[in-house]
Amino acid sequence: MLKLIQNEWIKIIKRPGTIVMVALIILLVGATGTFVKYNENKKEQNIDQNWKQSLQVETAEYKKELKGLKDKNDIQRPFLERSIAINEYRIEHNISPNEKTNVWTFMDVSSSLIILVGLFTIIVSANIVSSEFNWGTIKLLLIRPFSRKKIIMSKYITSILFGFALLFTLFVFSNLLGLALFGTGSGNTSYLAYVDGHVEEQSRLLYSAKLYVMSFIQTFMLASMAFMVSTVFRNNTIAIGVSILLLTVGSTVTAILANFFDWTKFILFANTDLMQYVNGTPLVEGMTMTFSIIVLIVYFVIFLGLSVVVFSKRDVAA
C-alpha cells in the first residue's frame, strides 16, 4: 500500500498543475497580507473609543429582537443569544472588540482561502482515477501485484493527503506572514467562545487550528464525493462540476431550507460546518457535534464504499 501511495504522490508532484496550485495559495496569502497591511492604518483611525456604549446599545437591540421571536426554533435565536452573551462579557471584563490586527486576526482572514484548497483537492480527487481510464494506463496499473481495493484506496488516500498538504501550507504560510507583518498583538488576544450557554476564553492558536481543520471537513467530504463520482462514471468533468457547484451553493441552500424543515439536519451540508458547535450556533435546534459526526461518517461510508465496490467489479477490457 505504501508503495502505491508513494507512486501516486510522484504522479501528482510531477504534474505542472500541482506547482501552480501551491504557488497560487502562497501568492494569494501574500496578496491578502499586503491588502490587510495597507488598510491597517485606516482601520485604526476608525476605531470607536466609546465601544462600551456602542455594545450596550447593540445588546439592547439584540435583546429586543430575541424577545420578539415567536418561533422557538428560529435560526436567528442562537446567533442573538451568542451575540448578547459575548457583548456582555466584553463589557464586564473590559475586552474591546476593536482588536488591533495581529497574526491571529490575519489567520482568520486568510482562512477564507480554504475554499481554494477545497477547489484544488476536488480537482485532484476527480482526476486521480478517471485520468487512468482516459490515458489508457489503467490496465498497466491493474497488472501489478496489488488487489484492486488497495489500488483504489491508495488513490483515495493520496488525494486526501494532498488536500491536507495544501491546508498545512496555507496554515503555516499565513502564520509566518502574519507574524512578520503584524506580530502577536498586545492585551487580551483570547478568542471568546460561546459554549453551553456561557462565554469562555480560549487560546487563539488552538482556535485557529480548529478553524482550519474544521473548515476542511466540507472539502474532505466533497473530495470524497468527487472521487466516488469520478470512479463510477469515469468522468472527471461531471465530478468536478457537481462538486464545485455544491461547494459554492450547498451550504447556502441548506441554510435556507433549515428555516422551514427540520429534516434539513440530515443533509450533508448541515453537518460539514463543525465550527457551528464551537460558536454555539447549530443550524437546526437540537443538533449536536456527535450527531453531525455520525451523519458525516454515514455519507463517508457511502461515498468510499461505492468507489471501492464499483472499481473492484468493473470490467476494464479494452
Image: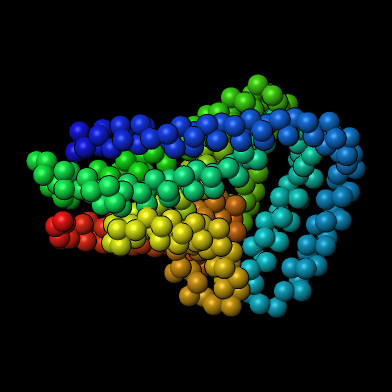
Residue 48 in the image: state x and y as whole percent.
88, 41
Residue 215 in the image: state x and y as whole percent.
51, 48
Which residue is pictured at 22% across the width and 45% down the height?
A: 137
Q: Is residue 230 left or right of residue 205?
A: left
Q: Which quarter of the rendered picture does the C terminus lie within? A: bottom left
Q: Is residue 73 left or right of residue 240?
A: right
Q: What is the quadrant of residue 68 in the picture? A: bottom right
Q: Is residue 96 left or right of residue 31?
A: right
Residue 248 in the image: state x and y as whole percent.
55, 58
Q: Does any portion of residue 178 appear in the rendered image?
A: yes
In terms of depth relative to the viewer, which is nearer, 104 or 18?
A: 18
In terms of depth relative to the viewer, which is nearer, 83 or 256?
A: 256
Q: Does any portion of residue 73 appear in the rendered image?
A: no
In terms of depth relative to the viewer, which is nearer, 277 or 299?
A: 299
Residue 211 in the image: state x and y as whole percent.
54, 43
Which residue is pictured at 62% across the width and 38% down the height?
A: 110
In terms of depth relative to the viewer, which is nearer, 296 or 154?
A: 154
Q: Is residue 238 above or below residue 223?
A: below
Which residue is pictured at 37% across the width and 52% down the height?
A: 126
Q: Which quarter of the rendered picture does the N terminus lie within? A: top left
Q: Is residue 166 left or right of residue 65?
A: left
Colour style of the rendered protein structure: rainbow
